[in-house]
Amino acid sequence: MIAGKDARETGNVMSQEGFNPGLRLKIAGQAAAPVAALRPEGLDTALTRALGKAAAPFEGLGLEASVDPPQWDIRPPDIAGALPEAGLLVMLNAGDAARALCLMDPGLVDALIEVQTTGAVAQGQGAVRPPTRIDAALTRDFLGLFLGALAGELAGKAGVDWPPGLSYGTHLSDRRQLELLLPDRPYHLFSASLDLGAGAKAGRIVLAVPVTGTAQVDGGGGTGAPDPGDWAARWQQAIRAAPLTLEAVLACRPLPLSRIEALQPGDVLPLDREDLAATALCDAGGRVIFRARLGRSAGHRAVRLTAGRGLAPAKAAPPAPAAPTDPPSSAASGKSTASDTAGGAPAA
């Protein structure tokens, strides 16, 4: 009897708790099992196509890309260890105080400079040298085109948990600044080996992007496909976030070729005062996007946009409401009062 009573009491305790402890631990272990993060499909193709689009305007570059396996969720110290020992290091703006990073190795930098100065990629790897501001200026357009094309290729894809719109920030001359400037957070590392000038040179490009979005996960039961109804909005968002370079052109002056060939450091080219108010902001193709006036702001040169091409004039303020009309006078109604009869004097 005592044993049966104990058994019944034990059963009551188990029923009150709902499950026995062993079963609860087993279920909790299954619930805590990690699920794989959803990664964007076709990333290799997107990187290859973006690099091809960036290289298209550079005639003679002949870029062929071979994408390396991506490295997911790594930290800044691991990024520093994965970068080539030499190359042009560029810090990219990723919005909301986040930063991304791109490295173009000496082979790619030299090839881009050569096709812009001589029209062809020179045979053989050049001597390794520290990158300069001129290197940064001559490679900036290629990098901007690559980032914009990649944003377009990945628009609407599930698993993209980094900012779609990356823009050029500044190039780093000292690699030791890297860990100080990169916030400590997870990053994805993408890289590709490049064949340049039909085998004339070999190059490499590395892109590190910050993980800023909410990670989408795939527990194995879903396809991870994006909502088709939201595709257009995501595409517009990616395109609008793509970087666009604008150049401020103060003035254009035709000069004889002999005068241009004779120019020396220290020569002065006079400008009219009207040029200050006729500054043009142009795109990479030289098309005027905005008109502006040259001036200063906080001790720096600046331009103020003016109404004209590309910028609509400010909207006029809405008209003030009309004043209320006075009620009809007594004279208008055909009736006279004592004050009217007495010439405006009050009646006695």
Image (cartoon, helix red, strand yellow):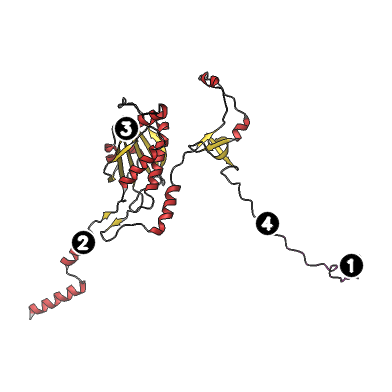
| Mark 3 secondary-structure assignment | loop
Q: Quadrant of the C terminus?
A: bottom right
Q: Are marks 4 and 1 in contact (CB under 8 Å)?
A: no
Q: Are marks 2 and 3 in contact (CB under 8 Å)?
A: no
The residue beneath circle 4 is 320
Answer with the quarter of the image where residue 280 lies.
top right
- Residue 340's disc number: 1
| Mark 1 secondary-structure assignment | helix
Which numbered mark, 4 or 1, is in the foreground of this view? 4
Q: Earlier in the sequence, mark 3 or mark 1?
A: 3
The residue beneath circle 3 is 198
| Mark 4 secondary-structure assignment | loop
- Does any portion of residue 340 appear in the rendered image? yes
Amino acid of disc 2? Gln
Q: Earlier in the sequence, mark 4 or mark 2?
A: 2
Amino acid of disc 4? Ala
Amino acid of disc 1? Asp
Which numbered mark, 3 or 1, is in the foreground of this view? 3
